[in-house]
Image (cartoon, rainbow, N blue to C red):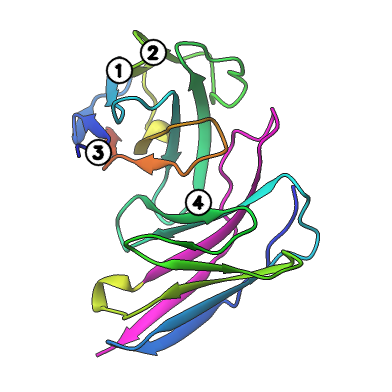
Amino acid sequence: DAKTTQPNSMESNEEEPVHLPCNHSTISGTDYIHWYRQLPSQGPEYVIHGLTSNVNNRMASLAIAEDRKSSTLILHRATLRDAAVYYCILRDVGFGNEKLTFGTGTRLTIIP
Amino acid sequence: GAGVSQSPSNKVTEKGKDVELRCDPISGHTALYWYRQSLGQGLEFLIYFQGNSAPDKSGLPSDRFSAERTGGSVSTLTIQRTQQEDSAVYLCASSRFLTRDGEFFGPGTRLTVL
């Protein structure tokens, strides 16, 4: 599987935007970029995913570089509830890629 | 709309007993996944279903574990002769399409084997 690289930790002030980066220089043409997060003592939560174009949903925005070798998850206005570990994952659509595998992710701390 | 639901939310059992965990996926989701997560550990993939079919059962930890899905909807994960190392949170997720779509997770079943 193509690998992703994320900073181990980030901090942001409450009510400010947060930009979480992810590098995936070996991404293949059929890899989708997925973001999940895991809040303390909770199960994983789907955030957003995309292939080539930028994506927006009610939780966040995903900005994908033109060469697709990096992406940024954008939380427009951070709240304390957004404190979590954020995982950037590449997922190929082919058979044998059904297993969701989380790396170490970015631990996001929100400062009140 | 309704999310993924799992039952029971908590299960305490004695070593050697059988347990059955249930997952109700989001309506219309064709793919269903089972994972488990031990305290402080990462996510461990167990099995996935495309419709009612589970093409690859190699992720199940032992032959004491089995899973089925009926009607393209509800799935049950059965653990026979439970052992203490089976203690974990068992998570179910579903998605519209296998691998191409985001997975929506249920709240999990916390299994404790005494």
Kind of residue sitting beneath label 2: Arg
Tags 2 and 1 in contact by the CB under 8 Å rule?
Answer: yes
Q: Are marks 1 and 3 on the same chain?
A: yes
Kind of residue sitting beneath label 4: Gly
Which residue, given by chain and number where applicable, does mark 3 sit on?
B3
Compared with A9, B68 (above or below) is: above
Relative placement, left or right, of B96 versus A66 is: left
> Would you call the spot at circle 4 few (<14 residues within 10 Å), some (14-19), or many (20 or more)?
few
Q: In the image, which residues are magenta? A: A84-112
> Would you call the spot at circle 1 few (<14 residues within 10 Å), some (14-19), or many (20 or more)?
some
Q: Chain letter of disc 2?
A: B
Q: Which mark is residue B74?
A: 1
Q: Chain letter of disc 3?
A: B
> Would you call the spot at circle 3 few (<14 residues within 10 Å), some (14-19), or many (20 or more)?
some
> Would you call the spot at circle 2 few (<14 residues within 10 Å), some (14-19), or many (20 or more)?
many
Q: Residue at x 20, y 39 (%)?
A: B1
Q: Quadrant of residue A38?
A: bottom left
Residue A103 highlighted magenta (yes or no) = yes
Q: Are marks 2 and 1 on the same chain?
A: yes
Residue A83 highlighted magenta (yes or no) = no
**From mark 4 to mark 2, how far is it between C-alphas?**
25 Å
Q: Residue at x 77, y 49 (%)?
A: A29
**From mark 2 to mark 1, how far is it between C-alphas?**
6 Å
Task: Give whichever of discs 1 and 3 has the lower sequence position.
Answer: 3
SS for dot 4: loop
Kind of residue sitting beneath label 3: Gly
Compared with B17, A91 (above or below) is: below
Task: Give whichever of discs 4 and 2 has the lower sequence position.
Answer: 4
